[in-house]
Image (cartoon, rainbow, N blue to C red):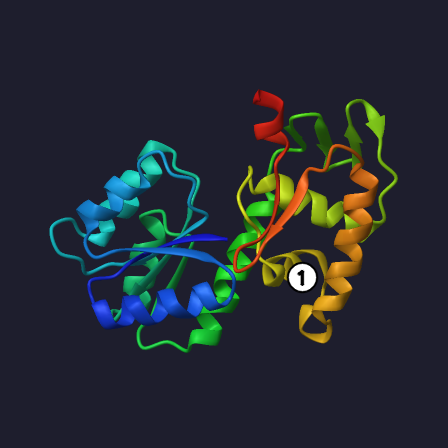
């Protein structure tokens, strides 16, 4: 998961970044609204953690401009203003969720994962990258026109990787997206499923792993090479 933390409290921003990177996410930081808009221009961030009270350009304006530009990132507003009116106002601006400060880190993480699942549920029914084609409605997958015989979990893993558009997906995210109760599973379960999926995807290999980042599909790059 690719996250942009937009927070002018540098200690909080650093703490969040360190924690999210520890979860296997790719997390960057902007300390004001103008910097955030610059970083988000043309980027493929999955979630923006957006403080409302920002210098230079307010969080409200950042939220509004992202929505008007059609940026697909989910927006989770973080603010000390937590009344019902504040929450409604933030959601009406286009935020996907709203969390009042101070907050528990585990709640923030749970809300981020819920936004990720919601994003996947609203994804296009047909995903294509290189020679891979995934029909999410009919739950069919092909490579170079040849049907892949995947188990339900293998299909879920492939769908999550396809949605990343060549980006890395952490082990934790894959467990969360493909299993109903990931807390009850070990990393070994994921490794077995990944090994089976890699074998069924065939040659040349397209599924890779990078320590500290996670798994990614490289078919889009291969197709253009």
Spot occupied by residue 54 in the image (x, y as percentages of width and height)? 17, 57
Considering only vertical position in the picture, is 192 above or below 167?
below
Asked if residue 29 shows in the view, the reply is: yes
Is 27 displayed left or right of 191 in the figure? left
Question: Looking at the rendering, which quadrant does residue 64 occupy?
Answer: top left
Could you tell whether 145 is left or right of 109 in the image? right
15 sits left or right of 178 in the view: left
In the picture, the quarter occupied by the C terminus is top right
For the point 25% across and 69% down, the residue is 81
**Neighbour class for label 1 at 10 Å: few (<14), some, many (≥20)?**
many
Residue 47 rendering spot, x and y as whole percentages: 43, 52
Where on the picture, by quarter, is residue 67? top left
Q: Nearer the viewer, residue 176 or 97?
A: 176
Q: Residue 219: x percent and y percent? A: 64, 32
| Residue at screen point 68% across, 37% down | 206
40 displayed left or right of 55: right
Rendered residue at 71%/25% (across/down):
131
Q: Read off the residue under disc 1.
A: 175
Q: Secondary structure at mark 1?
A: helix
58, above or below 84, in the image: above
Q: Is residue 127 above or below residue 117?
A: above
């Amino acid at each position: 998961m690719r996250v942009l933390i937009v927070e002018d409290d540098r200690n909080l921003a650093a703490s969040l970044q360190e924690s999210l990177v520890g979860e296997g996410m790719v997390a960057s930081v902007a300390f004001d609204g103008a910097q955030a808009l610059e970083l988000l221009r043309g980027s493929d961030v999955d979630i923006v953690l957006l403080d409302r009270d920002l210098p230079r350009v307010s969080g409200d304006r950042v939220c509004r401009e992202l929505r008007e530009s059609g940026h697909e990132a989910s927006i989770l507003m973080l603010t000390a203003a937590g009344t019902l009116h504040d929450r409604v106002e933030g959601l009406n601006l286009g935020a996907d969720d709203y969390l009042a400060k101070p907050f528990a880190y585990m709640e923030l993480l749970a809300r981020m994962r819920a936004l990720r699942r919601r994003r996947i549920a609203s994804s296009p029914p047909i995903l294509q990258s290189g020679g891979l084609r995934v029909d999410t409605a009919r739950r069919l997958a092909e490579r170079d026109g040849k049907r892949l015989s995947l188990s339900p979990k293998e299909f879920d893993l492939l769908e999550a990787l396809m949605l990343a558009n060549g980006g890395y997906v952490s082990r934790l995210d894959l467990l969360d997206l493909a299993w109903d109760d990931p807390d009850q599973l070990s990393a070994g379960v994921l490794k077995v499923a990944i090994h089976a999926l890699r074998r069924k995807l065939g040659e040349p290999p397209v599924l890779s792993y990078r320590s500290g980042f996670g798994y990614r599909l490289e078919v889009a790059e291969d197709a253009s090479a």
